[in-house]
Structures are given as structure tokens and as C-alpha cells.
Image: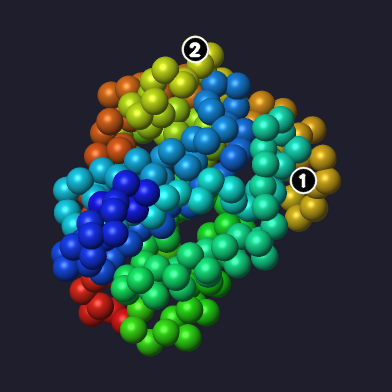
Amino acid sequence: MLLEQMSMPGFVEGLKRTRTVAVPCGAVEEHGSHLPLGTDTIHAYELCREAASRRPLFVAPPLFYGVIRSTRNHPGSVGIRPATFRAVVADVITDLRRQGLRSFLLISGHASGLQLAALTEVGEELLGIYPDIRVAVVSVLELAPHAWREVTECTDDSHAGEVETSVMLHLRPDWVGKDRPREWPRFPKHLLIRDKLRYWPGGVWGDASLASTTKGKKLFELSVAALISLVEELESGTWS
């Protein structure tokens, strides 16, 4: 039930099956020398697409542009302001509600603290305005971290490393470069750094040399299962 592919009658019929929609949010951001700039968006969108193939779930077109801070000076990173991001997400949810949706899963492929905070802020604000909606906010890295430990080897992996490279090898193998960089940046503690590229030249946080297609498939399947469980919890409303 991908919104961009549905007709008007198809959308109306879909509302008879579910009032839940996943809104994938990503970023146009560097992912080292080996992964595409759209990695975060692809990751989130494909998880939603797969979940929707297994149970009733609307999937909104992904929001490609996100809030970028640490990698904004790296070549290829293109972000928008937090205020712009919040406004776009709020408008999308508000209009989806107007069209009959009531449960909203905001899933970010971009694990930026600023982006997740913006999503949470929007969700909290709209919960206060519309008493008939439910909202969940999650990043792809938060879906199944405990289960992932049985698959991954790198203990400090958060950007363009073992996990994201493995997932992209599963989803878009032709888009992944042959090099497999390893990098762990170290920023001065407590200090706000203007030139982050100086401390993080490769744009990788983790060990991409440990990535594999087999790991990517396992990580993706664990994430889809966790996403479906979250949708079911969201729809139950027992926690609201």
C-alpha cells in the first residue's frame, strides 16, 4: 500500500483495511567512500515497503531531506533546517489525518539526534492537538539492536560501517563500492566543533570491512519483524 502507487479508489479501499501509515524519513548525506548519499532514506523506505507486503500498512513517500549536523561539510551532504523539517513532517501528518489515517509511525533512517528530537517534538505537539491519533518515533538503528548483536561483530558501529554496508549490500548491491573503510572519529569532549571534517575525514563510524550480504539479509529481516511488532503495538493503543 504505497501511497505514490495508489489510485483514489485504491486509497479508499485501503482505509477499510488499516488506518496506520508509516512515514519514512531519511537524508541526503555522505556515507563514506563506498555507500550512496541516499542510504538512510533507502534503508527506512525499504523496511516500510517490506512490512507493508506482509500486513496492512500504508507507506508514505519518503522524505529524502533531513537534519544534518556532523557531516554537513562532507561532500554531497545536503540538509534542511530543523524548523523546516518539523514543519514539513507536521504538515504531512496533519494532511494524512485529514485523509483518514489515525496511527502514524515516523521511522528515520538517519539516526541524527537532532532529527529524532524534531520528530518527537512534532509527534508530541500533534498528540496534544488531535486526541484521536497515535504516534510512534523510531530510528532504524533502534528497531532491533539486541537481536543485531548475534549478527554483527563491530561493537562501535553507527555510520556507514558494518551494519549499513551490510544492509545496502542486501538492498542495493550494485550501488555499493568495492572499498570497505574502517574509521572511528574522536571529537574533543564538550566542545562544539566548526570543522568536523577535520576530525572525521572519511565519514565512516565503524568497520565496513566486516560487512556482508548474508549479514545484511539477517539484519533486514530482524528489523522488519521488529517494525511489524511496533506497528501492532501502535495500533493496539494499550499504552496511550
Q: Residue at x 53, y 69 (%)?
A: 90
Q: Residue furthest top?
A: 178
Residue type (three-letter) at the residue carrying disc 2? Lys
Q: Assign the C terminus to one quadrant of the image.
A: bottom left
On screen, 85 above or below 196?
below
Question: Residue tagged by mark 1?
Answer: 188
Question: Spatial distance from mark 1 to mark 2, Cα to Cα?
Answer: 32 Å
Expressed as whole percent of the image width and height from the top left, the position of residue 162 reads 44, 29
Residue type (three-letter) at the residue carrying disc 1? Pro
Could you say whether the residue bearing mark 1 is in a helix, strand or loop?
loop
- Contact, CB < 8 Å: mark 1 with mark 2? no
Q: How is the image coloured?
A: rainbow
Quarter of image, res 147: top left
Is 107 or 199 nearer to us in this picture? 107
Expressed as whole percent of the image width and height from the top left, the position of residue 53 reads 20, 46
Expressed as whole percent of the image width and height from the top left, the position of residue 132 reads 34, 84
Could you say whether the residue bearing mark 2 is in a helix, strand or loop?
loop
Question: Residue tagged by mark 2?
Answer: 178
Q: Residue at x 71, y 30 (%)?
A: 75
Q: Residue at x 67, y 32 (%)?
A: 76
Dot 1 or dot 2: first in sequence order is 2
Quarter of image, res 131: bottom left
Mark whose residue sits in front, 1 or 2: 2
Q: Residue at x 38, y 73 (%)?
A: 97
Expressed as whole percent of the image width and height from the top left, the position of residue 170 reads 33, 27
On screen, 84 above or below 71?
below
Q: Is residue 142 visible?
A: no
Q: Is residue 43 visible?
A: yes
